[in-house]
Image (tube, rainbow, N blue to C red):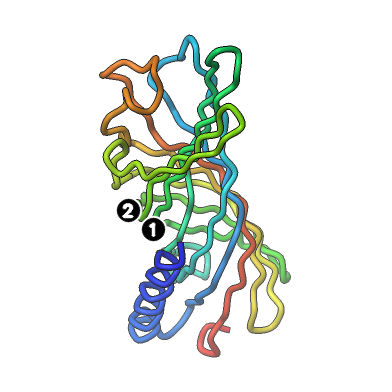
Amino acid sequence: MKTAVRETLVLSAVILLVGSQIFASQWEWGLKAGIVRSEAGFSRDLPYTYVESLNAFSAGSFLSFFFIKDQFGVQPEINYSVKGFDILEEDLGQEISSKYKISYIEIPVLIAYRFPLKGRLKPGLVFGPYVGFAHKVREVQAAFGNTEKRDLDDNLKKTDVGLVFGGNVRYRIGSIGIILSARYSLGFVNISKNIMEVAYDFYENDTIKNRAFTISLGVAFIPPASR
């Protein structure tokens, strides 16, 4: 996790540096952190398996460039996000929990819209594609009073592509904006590479796709030229 966070910070610094040199007005950059509630979209219902959502962590940085009356813009981001799911099975009368945690470096490029309201408070919408690169794939299995961890790089794919859509509320205080955001990401890629090793009642042609709901709190820094 520490390596992934370092990579995210380095990539964030590069984007912020390049963006600040290219765009001289109506732009801002910021940092954010939040909670991810992720789940798996399976191609069919599993008869002997119950799938629960997984709560995890997300953090990252963003740049916002607005072009038309400070309403329409583009918002590239770099985020560290943990997604996954929890599979519950039963064996010999005992519940077995297998949590699959996938740590992603995600790069969304979003179209942003701010409602033209007067005052410090402005709601907005975002929509756009993302690509995610898995940094670590791990299973945490709890069964018969024991907990076991193992890496699963051979069972789940390391690249994900999908769409992000959501909304936010931004409150401006001088050169700082406080942003509360809620968004949903919908993965298009079957992330399973060897699905029959994930749960015993999967078929070879079954698929798994990422689904995640994220709530985050961020701080935007507004340069003098954009105020």
Question: Where does the image place residue 179, in percent across and percent down from the top left?
Answer: 64, 64
Q: Is residue 133 toward the left or the right of residue 47 in the image? A: left
Q: Disc 2 to disc 1, how far (Cα)?
A: 5 Å
Say which residue appears at 34% left-offset and 41% top-offset. 152
Question: Where does the image place residue 130, in percent across and percent down from the top left?
Answer: 37, 51
Q: In which quarter of the image is the C terminus?
A: bottom right
Disc 2 marks which residue?
133
Asked whether 124 or 33 is in front, the reply is: 33
Q: Quadrant of residue 222?
A: bottom right
Question: Where does the image place residue 221, in percent across and percent down from the top left?
Answer: 57, 79
Q: Is residue 184 above or below residue 7?
A: above
Q: Residues within 10 Å of mark 2 (few under 14, many from 20)?
A: some
Q: In which quarter of the image is residue 188?
A: top left
Residue 66, visible in the rendered structure: no
Residue 126, visible in the rendered structure: yes
Disc 1 marks which residue?
105
What amino acid type is highlighted by mark number 1?
A: Ile
Q: What is the secondary structure assignment of the residue under circle 2?
A: strand
Q: What is the secondary structure assignment of the residue under circle 1?
A: strand
Label located before the other in sequence (2 or 1): 1
Question: Where does the image place residue 133, in percent across and percent down from the top left?
Answer: 32, 53
